[in-house]
């Protein structure tokens, strides 16, 4: 046989059939099958695969090359997958044909539509006659109509066509705009992966890959690839969105990935996870499941999401922990519809409930708007007792039934503290005062006058009592008030540095009627205050010290001299010293006499 034909070695880019076609043309055989029959071999693909030694002997081929283009196992991967072989129409690159004048094995793959070397789209019709390029034409470079295909013009291919066409041939040169979804070894199975994704691109379609025809024309190939192009162009967002849409289209009552996604999931699992291939693609799928699947992922160790990925839908126990409430309370809220979630009955006794993280965050945000009294005190910078008085005075809102509302984390609305603070700051009237009190001190350390405290707070809120300065960063306690303004509403604040006339009577032994008389005639300075809602006169420590520097009660002098006040009064008058502040009772008795320190000092000079 070898002596009768013009033999030449095959090119590295040729496949066995492409080489046989060129060999047949050079030796004037009508087609490659005629050449094979002349070599007394069966001209079928299966027979050629089984009789490679005979083919090598008949044509003088190198067994190493033939094993490369015709793998011993006919594994069905890469370019050797007869499942994807174009059998009746040729696709060609005119530029390659002009440069090398032979057909490439890559062009026979029904999913390849571009030439990565030239960045152009393959053609499968004659520019002259418009007919498809038959694989039975005599000269591979010439159309049956006589048109030289090497002179045909081409169109630029899309980046996706170039990327898929390159990877299907094991060509790993970079392609701008596309990230890798696997290794070079993985791409041997890319054809089956792309075909599976393309024929199932519509979630509602029911397909059987073995009974689904492969594209034979380039138009069919491009239409099929265009359907999955969005999945890979915006990687991985496009693929993530596709998984999301498939989950939405699935039966919402089914809570397993295989049940919700059906055959699409099974095929993807077999081609990626089970085959230990396309790890980036499987990670993208796992991420999408973590983002969008509202079903049961327990025991789904097959998923391999990105390390930082958090599942969008979380079980109620986890959701309750994130919110900070008991799981039973959250479950009750889910069942009553107060919060959104997904509940499904699994079997006879197992119930699965999941919540979207967005809903969990909404509940957390809502609850954070309502806080406990201690938290409110911390924010306001005042003691908790002040918060209680503000609530009772009507200046803060409290919901006594807050514990029954899952959207409230406490009884006090957080915003009303800020609103109150902003209002009081706007009312500040700066001025110098001899004495002042911070907001947190307004309750007094010994007061039990709740009504007075409430009246004071209400007066502050209305602007009748205004702060004299504000120190930022301290909340309500940054507001400072004049003590004199405060005493008009809450006399008890003065008890920290003063006494009422009754308290002064007990402390010094002076008669109340004498104290009252001294106050009336101006010898003892007092301030009118409200105590327990009743008017009272307050003697400050400053006023008492001033009184002691000016006057000495005759009763105190008599006690020091161990004599009676009446006897001492007579002696004082005999010496010409005036007695002041004496109160004459209706009975004629006199009390409360005072001697001036100045007069006593004059006796010593």
Image (cartoon, helix red, strand yellow):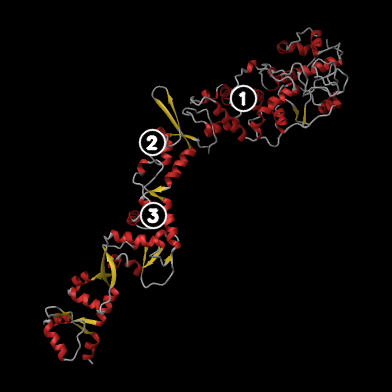
Residue at the limit of the structure toward the top, as seen here: 40
Residue 533: percent from left, percent from top: 27, 63
Classify mark 3: helix, strand or loop.
Answer: helix
Quadrant placement of the C terminus: bottom left
Q: Which of 11 and 1 is in front in this view?
A: 11
Res. 463 visible in picture? yes
Q: In which quarter of the image is residue 305?
A: top right
Q: Which residue is drawn at 29% across and 75% down?
A: 542
Rendered location of residue 578, percent (x, y): 20, 88
Q: How far apart are marks 3 and 1 (CA)?
A: 57 Å
Q: Residue 378 carries which label?
A: 3
Q: Is residue 502 left or right of residue 356?
A: left
Please determine whether, in this image, residue 236 is positioned above or below residue 195: below
Residue 374 % position (x, y)? 36, 52
Q: Name the residue under label 1.
A: 202
| 192 or 102, nearer to the observer | 192
Query: Relative to 194, does residue 490 appear above or below in the rendering?
Result: below
Residues 172 and 262: in front is 262
Q: Tell me the crowding category of disc 2: few under 14, some 14 to 19, or many 20 or more residues within 10 angstroms, Cα based.
A: some
Q: Distance between the residues labelled 2 and 3?
A: 28 Å
Query: Which image quarter: residue 153?
Result: top right
Q: Position of residue 266 (x, y in %)?
A: 56, 22
Question: Residue placed at 60% from the left, 19% from the top?
Answer: 206
Q: Earlier in the sequence, mark 2 or mark 3?
A: 2
Do residues under tags 3 and 1 come within 8 Å of each other at their CB atoms? no
Is 475 displayed left or right of 197 in the figure?
A: left
Residue, disc 2: 327
Give the mark nearest the N terminus, 3 or 1: 1
Q: In this view, does 325 lie above or below 564?
A: above
Mark 2–mark 3 contact, CB under 8 Å?
no
Of 536 and 7, nearer the camera is 536
Q: Is residue 282 visible?
A: no
């Amino acid at each position: 046989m070898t002596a009768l034909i013009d033999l030449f070695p095959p090119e590295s880019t040729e496949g066995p059939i492409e080489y046989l076609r060129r060999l047949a043309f050079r030796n004037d055989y009508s087609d490659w099958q005629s050449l094979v029959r002349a070599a007394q071999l069966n001209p079928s693909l299966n027979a050629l695969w089984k009789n490679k030694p005979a083919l090598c002997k008949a044509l003088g081929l190198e067994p190493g090359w033939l094993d490369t283009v015709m793998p011993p196992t006919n594994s069905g991967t890469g370019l050797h997958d007869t499942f994807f072989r174009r059998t009746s129409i040729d696709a060609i690159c005119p530029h390659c044909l002009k440069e090398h004048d032979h057909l490439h094995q890559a062009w026979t793959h029904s999913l390849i539509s571009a030439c990565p070397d030239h960045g152009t789209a393959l053609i499968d019709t004659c520019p002259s006659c418009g007919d498809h390029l038959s694989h039975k034409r005599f000269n591979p470079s010439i159309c049956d109509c006589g048109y030289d295909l090497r002179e045909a013009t081409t169109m630029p291919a899309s980046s996706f066509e170039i990327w898929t066409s390159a990877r299907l041939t094991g060509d790993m040169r970079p392609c701008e705009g596309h990230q890798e979804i696997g290794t070079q070894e993985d791409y041997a199975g890319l054809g089956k992966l792309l075909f599976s994704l393309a024929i199932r691109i519509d979630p509602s379609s029911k397909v059987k890959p073995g009974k689904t025809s492969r594209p034979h024309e380039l138009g069919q190939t491009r239409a099929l690839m265009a359907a999955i192009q969005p999945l890979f162009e915006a990687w991985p967002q496009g693929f993530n969105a596709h998984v999301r849409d498939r989950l939405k289209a699935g039966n919402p009552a089914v809570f397993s990935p295989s049940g919700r996604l059906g055959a699409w999931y099974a095929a993807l699992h077999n081609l990626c996870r089970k085959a230990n291939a396309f790890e980036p693609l499987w990670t993208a799928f796992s991420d999408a499941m973590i983002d969008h699947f509202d079903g049961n992922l327990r025991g789904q160790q097959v998923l391999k999401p990105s390390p930082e990925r958090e599942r969008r839908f979380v079980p109620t126990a986890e959701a309750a922990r994130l919110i900070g409430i008991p799981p039973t309370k959250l479950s009750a809220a889910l069942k009553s519809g107060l919060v959104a979630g997904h509940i499904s009955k699994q079997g006879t006794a197992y119930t699965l409930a999941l919540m979207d993280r967005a809903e969990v965050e909404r509940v957390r945000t809502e609850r954070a708007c309502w806080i406990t009294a201690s938290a409110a005190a911390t924010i306001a910078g005042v003691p908790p007792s002040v918060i209680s008085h503000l609530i009772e005075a009507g200046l803060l809102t409290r919901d006594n039934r807050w514990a029954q509302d899952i959207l409230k984390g406490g009884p006090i609305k957080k915003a009303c503290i800020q609103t109150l603070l902003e209002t009081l700051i706007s009312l500040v009237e700066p001025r110098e005062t001899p004495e002042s009190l911070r907001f947190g001190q307004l309750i007094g350390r010994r007061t039990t006058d709740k009504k007075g405290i409430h009246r004071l707070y209400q007066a502050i809120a209305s602007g009748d009592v205004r702060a004299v300065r504000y120190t930022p960063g301290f909340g309500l306690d940054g507001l400072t008030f004049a003590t004199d303004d405060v005493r008009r509403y809450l006399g008890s604040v003065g008890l920290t540095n003063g006494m009422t006339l009754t308290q002064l009577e007990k402390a010094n032994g002076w008669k109340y009627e004498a104290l009252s008389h001294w106050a009336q005639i101006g010898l003892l300075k007092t301030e009118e205050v409200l105590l327990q809602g009743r008017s009272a006169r307050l003697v400050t420590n400053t006023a008492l010290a001033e009184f002691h520097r000016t006057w000495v009660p005759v009763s105190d002098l008599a006690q020091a001299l161990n004599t009676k006040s009446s006897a001492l009064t007579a002696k004082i008058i005999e010496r010409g010293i005036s007695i002041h502040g004496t109160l004459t009772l209706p009975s004629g008795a006199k009390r409360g006499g005072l001697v001036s320190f100045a007069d006593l000092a004059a006796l010593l000079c």
